[in-house]
């Protein structure tokens, strides 16, 4: 049981509209009753914020439950049964560092054995930034370290290609460490969000995306019980994009575009999705 979802729009009210009318396909169920953890990262007033719940007892969890009263044009959501690390806020995704949000699904096989080698790969200032003890946070910091090596970590706006490259380097390092330890490859999906957009990488479970653009694409999100009273805003220049993975039963919803295994995707607020298929 897991869920990873990113939503990006060029109007903050569109996120809530999507959750209300289309979010059912991205809800999570926990029939076995084991505690799970969830969190969202979002942008408000130019700042990236977190809302995280390390222990959740509900057996059904919708995007609306996670969103609450948040109004934002950017959302990175994560739901997962805790498999590595204690149940705490520091171990609950998404993680944040400066202008970056990060979340992943899947568990890194042999993390206890790989952890010292991953730690050795980090510069000292990123080692000090570690707060929890999960494989996801270590993967995030490896990604940050490759941005740092490329001189991009402190840039106010990082280009999608640089994020693609850093994620590819992170994945290559982990695969090498697994091979050297004689461990099988770990299927892991990742998402990185910045103020400029969302990058998703499919290295595991099925991942897909959907774009709602213009009046024709978005007017369905404004349907109500009394359509005669609805005054549609000007939607021609509006766009909302969503990317998700770990669907129930790995079944991709109708109307979504699947992402190839090993491929990465960049979503912006106004442009068409940009795919980077392997190899880069």
Image: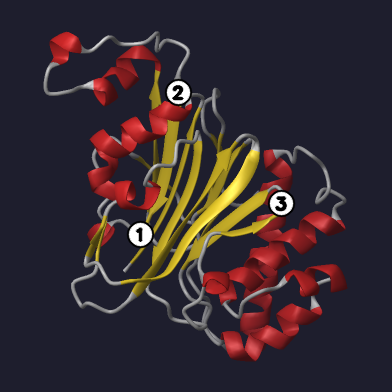
Q: Is residue 173 left or right of residue 232?
A: right
Provide the residue designation for mark 3: 165
Dot 1, crowdedness within 10 Å: few (<14), some or many (≥20)?
many
Q: Is residue 57 left or right of residue 275?
A: left
Dot 2, crowdedness within 10 Å: few (<14), some or many (≥20)?
many
Does residue 273 sit above or below 6 in this rendering?
above
Q: Is residue 107 left or right of residue 35?
A: right
Does residue 43 sit above or below 53 in this rendering?
above
Sequence-wise, which precedes: disc 2 or disc 3? 3
Provide the residue designation for mark 2: 239
Sequence-wise, which precedes: disc 1 or disc 3? 3
Q: Is residue 205 left or right of residue 275?
A: left
Sequence-wise, which precedes: disc 1 or disc 2? 2
Q: Are marks 1 and 2 in contact (CB under 8 Å)?
A: no
Quarter of the image with the N terminus in it: bottom left
Q: Can the viewer see residue 238 in this picture?
A: yes
Residue 165 x %, y %: 71, 51
- For label 3, the SS is helix
Q: How is the image coloured?
A: secondary structure
Residue 249 x %, y %: 23, 61
Provide the residue designation for mark 1: 246
The answer for how far apart the CA atoms under marks 1 and 2 are is 24 Å
Does residue 180 sit above or below 175 in this rendering?
below
Q: Can the viewer see residue 276 in this picture?
A: no
The answer for how far apart the CA atoms under marks 1 and 3 are is 24 Å
Q: Residue at x 82, y 43 (%)?
A: 155
Q: Which mark is residue 108?
A: none
Does residue 117 sit above or below 230 in this rendering?
below
Judging depth in this view, the residue of 108 and 29 nearest the camera is 29
- For label 1, the SS is loop
Residue 273 x %, y %: 52, 32
């Amino acid at each position: 049981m897991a869920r990873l979802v990113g939503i990006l729009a060029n109007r903050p009210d569109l996120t809530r509209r999507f959750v209300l009318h289309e979010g059912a396909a991205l809800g999570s169920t926990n029939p076995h009753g084991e505690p799970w953890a969830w969190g969202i990262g979002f942008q408000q007033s130019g700042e990236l914020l977190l809302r995280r719940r390390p222990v959740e007892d509900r057996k059904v969890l919708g995007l609306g439950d996670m969103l609450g009263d948040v109004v934002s044009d950017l959302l990175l959501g994560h739901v997962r049964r805790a498999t590595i690390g204690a149940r705490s806020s520091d171990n609950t995704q998404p993680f944040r560092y400066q202008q970056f949000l990060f979340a992943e699904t899947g568990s890194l096989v042999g993390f206890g054995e790989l952890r010292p080698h991953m730690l050795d790969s980090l510069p000292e200032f990123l080692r000090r930034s570690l707060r929890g003890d999960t494989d996801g946070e270590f993967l995030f910091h490896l990604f940050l370290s490759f941005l740092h090596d490329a001189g991009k970590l402190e840039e106010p706006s990082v280009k999608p290609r640089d994020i693609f490259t850093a994620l590819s380097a992170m994945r290559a390092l982990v695969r090498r460490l697994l091979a050297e330890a004689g461990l099988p490859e770990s299927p892991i999906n990742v998402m990185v969000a910045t103020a400029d957009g969302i990058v998703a990488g499919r290295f595991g479970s099925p991942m897909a995306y959907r774009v709602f653009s213009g009046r024709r694409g978005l007017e369905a999100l404004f349907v109500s019980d009394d359509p005669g009273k609805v005054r549609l805003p000007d939607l021609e220049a509006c766009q909302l994009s969503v990317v998700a993975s770990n669907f129930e039963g790995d079944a991709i919803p109708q109307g979504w575009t699947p992402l190839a295994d090993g491929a990465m995707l960049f979503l912006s607020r106004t442009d068409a999705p940009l795919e980077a298929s392997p190899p880069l």
